[in-house]
Amino acid sequence: MQRRAIAAVLSLLLTLSGCTIKKVQQVAPASVAVPLPANESIVGITTVKGEDVSFDKPGATFVNGMLHGSVKTAAYAISVDQVQRYWIEKRDISTARTVGLVAGVAAGIVIIVLAVAASKSKTTTTTAPSTTGTTQSCPFVYSWDGTRYVFDAEPYGGAIAKGLEKDDYSELGQLREEDGRYKLRITNEVDETQMTNLTELWVVDHSAGTRVVPDILGKLHTVSAPQELLSAQDAEGRDLLPWLRSTDRLIWEPPSVPDANGSLQGDIVMTFPKPADAKQVKLVANASTGLWGSYMIKKMVELRGKDVGKFYFAVNHSQSARNKLTAWEEREELYRLKVYVEEPTGWVVRGILPGTGPYISKDRILPLDVSHVAGDQLKIRIHPPAGFWALNSFTADYSADQPLTVQTLKPSTAQNMQGKSVLADLVSVDNRYLAMPNIGDADHLTFAAPARKEGAEREVFLHTRGYYKLHIRDAGAPDKKTLEAFEKAPGTAARFAADQYRQWQVASQKGP
């Protein structure tokens, strides 16, 4: 069992990069060291206790169910069942990538989901486990950091039809000006057709000592007095403070498995300090859709079989159909997470946090009314279904927004792989789209960088608008029974996802 578990971790690693890594490699038995490809190494781990461990070069290896490496020249070893997340670095000529694999090993079953280390100046591409097929995502946007292109944004996640087209706002933390230009590369690395309507940069110059963070509607806010969590706990009494207090390599991402009481609905209560006269808070959330949740989008659409065209027609042409879908998402909280605030009358929903693409998570602000909250503490509650959310950090800021200087940049040039200009497809919201139907499609954009404002700090944000089309076979009879249960019985979709996950676990046990 243990050998199969180790094999599953490594063979999945080799299938996690879509078109970048195409070969699935059979892993050697665990009685010997298990090598990674020459350009990949295990550079770190997060333990189940919440310890962040970074290995000396050349990284760690698997031997007899243990992970062995060196940390600050001292020998280090840990059992694989004590590893919550593996950090895998992949290097080639033009990019460097760090992939985080969450791996809980129990009874020989490997549980794997993915995340991106946002603090690392490297790129990451990932897909779902090979036993389940390719996950769904959205375009990958790479920023030029002065040396190479770095994975920096994953826009309009979850917009799986034209009727669901949406705007997305992402900080490009790795983007650097070179010769008066900003350069981006947009790629398709998953099995879908990506349709981008608009791409522009917002260049923001602001006072030193503050940060700028967009809210879910694209309004830019300043964060100048962030208040960290005082406490965070789930329904089973686990202390989640180490996992949720800062944006780092500790990411709370439980698998799609019922808890001890058989529940799939999480229950997390977070406590922040609160000024006595506060009326509103800017909740800064670094959270994204989990990988399994992303994969379930496609699985649930596939249940419609030959009727999938009817589903797309409805969401593309009917506002009531779109409203119905949104209401269902809010009820189930799979891709729209309700945020509750404790008030004297009880818990009240004060905001909705939409999901994002599963591979890279950025800070987003959710403004919340706290005018009814009594006392000097703010308590916030969320119910993330297991397997659908990856939670990195939450902070609160009560400060007033400061003035900002924002310049909107349209692309100066935009070329596809054949050298053809696609500029007209990206400069305005209209009926022209940059279509990327194939894995491997890529487009290069440049922007003229404006002069910096003296004494100010600068952040650059990517504003995009678009949607993507899943590549789904519309054959076979629809599973009407399951679809009706999704609609009528709350929690059915989460149980369906857990059942799919259990089936994958069984396949992992059996091994190749």
Image (tube, rainbow, N blue to C red):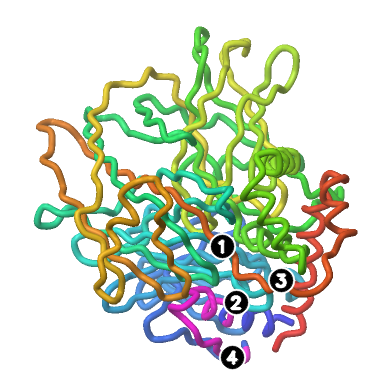
Query: Is residue 505 located in the magenta-colored stretch of the structure?
Result: no
Mark earlier in primary sequence (2, 4):
2
* Majority secondary structure in the magenta region: loop
Tag 1 residue? 469
**Spatial CA span between label 2 and label 4:** 11 Å
Magenta region: 11-29
Image quarter hosting the C terminus: bottom right
Instruction: Identify which amino acid the numbered label 1 is placed on.
Output: Lys
Q: Residue at x 50, y 76 (%)?
A: 68
- Tell me residue 195's x, y (percent): 46, 59
Q: Quadrant of the N terminus?
A: bottom right
Q: Position of residue 479 (x, y in %)?
A: 85, 64
| Res 83 visible | no
Identify the residue position indicated by label 3 in the image: 474
Labels 2 and 4 touching (C-beta < 8 A): no
At 20% from the left and 36% from the top, the residue drawn is: 457
Location of mark 4 (residue): 26
Observer-nearest of 357 and 1 = 357
| Between discs 3 and 2, the one toward the N terminus | 2
Say which residue appears at 80% left-offset and 51% top-offset. 259
Contact, mark 2 vs mark 1 (Cβ under 8 Å)? no
User: How many labels, in total?
Assistant: 4
Please give the residue where the numbered disc 2 appears in the rendered image: 9
Q: Which tag is nearer the camera, tag 4 or tag 3?
A: 3
Name the secondary structure under disc 2.
Answer: helix
Q: Amino acid at mark 4?
A: Gln
How far apart are the alpha carbons under marks 3 and 1?
A: 13 Å
- Residue 23 lies in magenta, yes or no? yes
